[in-house]
Image (cartoon, grey):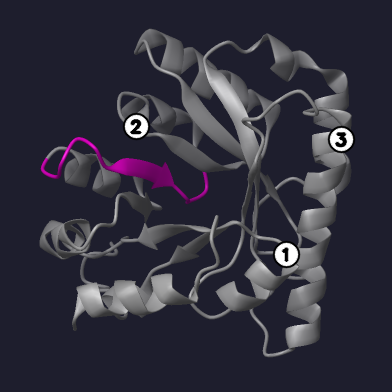
Amino acid sequence: MDIKENLNRIKATLPAGVRLVAVSKTHPADMLMEAYNAGQRIFGENKVQEMTAKSQVLPADIEWHFIGHVQSNKIKMMAPYVSVIQGVDTFDKLAEIDRQAAKNGRHITCYLQLHIASEETKFGFSPDECTAMLDEGKWRSLQNITIGGVMGMATNTDDEAQVRREFSRLKEIFDSYKQKYFAGSADFNTISAGMSGDYELAIQAGSNMVRIGSAIFGERNYNLDK
């Protein structure tokens, strides 16, 4: 497993302006360090305890992205160091992130997770729920967070046309929110979509952040995924 070679191969396929989140969940810190030494600085984790443990032993300039389903009672654990929380799907979670960020004297970027897949098991706001939350406007009073964009996962299917439609829908939602709610915000700038198996389709549909794990680090170490 040549992590540097894998990283360079993937980066060579990314257009200018597309950022790479190296999804490092279940992989040990020494493998993340190999990616770090190859120039990678953004890492994504989906379990707070695992991300916290790694953050304590890896370089301080790593930009940690929490990409899992956000549980309100775990936010305080990651608030001291996390840069971006990608899977925010309720206003109450935005408010709790804001509260914990303030306690730590920090500012945390959040992405609104939209449910764009046909699978019911995926988390996220429905587009109508998210629009209603933004219309209500309470988020505008939160001082220690920035809503930086949207995140979504396509259906796990071999039907490329369906995957393209779902990613295109996320881009449409992003564009409508940018125009209606964030026209004056340079910070609302990210569409996080696409993983190892479908990131090229996501980029074609407008994604400018991809979350790639197995194509960099190999298959998950399930012994750590407990």
| Amino acid marked by disc 2 | Met
- Residue under pointer 3: 179
- Residue 46 image position (x, y, % from top left): 40, 53
- Circle 2 packing at 10 Å, graded few (<14), some (14-19), many (20+), is many
| Amino acid marked by disc 3 | Gln
Q: Nearer the viewer, mark 2 or mark 1?
A: 2
Q: CA distance from mark 3 to mark 1?
A: 29 Å
- Residue 180 image position (x, y, % from top left): 88, 31
Asked whether 136 or 41 is in front, the reply is 41
User: Looking at the magenta stretch, what is its main secondary structure?
Assistant: loop
In the image, the segment drawn in magenta is 57-70
- Circle 3 packing at 10 Å, graded few (<14), some (14-19), many (20+), is few
- Residue under pointer 2: 78
Q: Nearer the viewer, mark 3 or mark 1?
A: 3
Asked whether 103 or 84 is in front, the reply is 84
The residue positioned 24% from the left and 37% from the top of the image is: 61
Q: Quadrant of residue 201?
A: bottom right
The residue positioned 30% from the left and 29% from the top of the image is: 81
Mark yes or no: residue 117 visible: no
Q: CA distance from mark 2 to mark 3?
A: 31 Å
- Residue under pointer 1: 120
Quadrant assignment for the C terminus: bottom left
| Amino acid marked by disc 1 | Glu
Discs 3, 1 touching: Cβ within 8 Å? no
Disc 2 element: helix
- Circle 1 packing at 10 Å, graded few (<14), some (14-19), many (20+), is few
Discs 2, 1 touching: Cβ within 8 Å? no
Q: CA distance from mark 2 to mark 1?
A: 28 Å
- Asked if 65 appears above or below 204 in the picture, the reply is above
